[in-house]
Amino acid sequence: MTATTLYELSVNDKRNQPYDLAALKGKVVVVVNVASKCGFTPQYKGLEALYQKYKDQGLVILGFPCDQFGGQAPGSAEEEASTCQLNFGVTFPILEKIEVNGDNAHPVYVWLKSQKSGLLGLKRIKWNFEKFVVDKEGRVVERYASTTEPASLEKTIEKLLA
C-alpha cells in the first residue's frame, strides 16, 4: 500500500516509542529535518516562534534529527532534542533520528519527497532544515529549501489554518 496522506505513515518519538501521526488529522504540520550543529541550526528559534504563534490554532511542527549532512546531528534523538530545548527553547516534538536520503531513508521522507520535488525537480533532500508543509487533510502543499527562514512560511500556514 502506498500512503496517500501523512496520517497513514508510522514514526517513533525521540525515545523510540510510537508517535501517532493520525492524531494530527485536522492540523497543519511542518516537517523538518533538523541538526544541532549546522549553520542553519539557529532556525530552531524561528520554528519555535511559528509554533508558539500558531499552535493553539492547529499548527504542529515535527523535527526529525538527521546526521546525513556533514555529521551535524551527532547525538541520539534524545540528545539532539535536549540540545535544541536547552539552546533554543524548542517545545515542538522532536522525533526519532532518521535518514532522509538513500536506501535507508525513512518512509515519511520517501513519501514527502514523492509528493513535492525540490528546486529544479530534485527529489533528494539537499541539506538540514528543509521544510515540508502538510495541510489539514495530510497532503504536502509546499516544500521549502534549507535557506528559507521559518518566518517565510507564515503566509502559507495562515492560509491553511483559516
Image: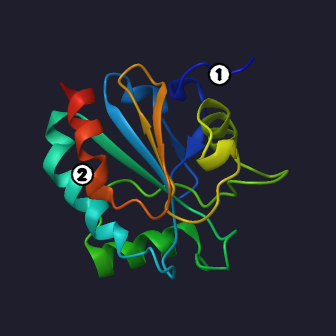
Q: Is residue 91 in view? A: no
Q: Nearer the viewer, residue 91 or 43?
A: 43
Residue that label 2 marks: 51
Figure quadrant of residue 92: bottom left
Q: Position of residue 158 (x, y in %)?
A: 20, 35
In the depicted structure, whether residue 46 falls above or below residue 59: below
Figure quadrant of residue 57: top left
Q: Residue at x 65, y 34 (%)?
A: 111
Amino acid type of the residue that numbered disc 1 sits on in the rendered structure: Ala
Q: Is residue 62 in view? A: yes
Q: Position of residue 62 (x, y in %)?
A: 43, 49
CA gap, disc 2 and disc 1: 26 Å
Q: Secondary structure at mark 1?
A: loop
Point out the residue furthest to the front here. Answer: 120
Amino acid type of the residue that numbered disc 2 sits on in the rendered structure: Tyr
Q: Position of residue 103 (x, y in %)?
A: 85, 50
Q: Nearer the viewer, residue 19 or 123?
A: 123
Answer with mark 2 or mark 1, whichever residue precedes in sequence. 1
Image quarter (top left, top right, bottom left or bottom right) of the N terminus: top right
In the depicted structure, whether residue 149 falls above or below residue 110: below
Q: Secondary structure at mark 2?
A: helix
Is residue 122 shown left or right of residue 11?
right
Q: Which mark is residue 3?
A: 1
Q: Residues within 10 Å of mark 2 (few under 14, many from 20)?
A: many
Image quarter (top left, top right, bottom left or bottom right) of the C terminus: top left
Is residue 12 shown left or right of residue 40?
right
Q: Residue at x 62, y 39 (%)?
A: 117
Q: Residues within 10 Å of mark 1 (few under 14, many from 20)?
A: few
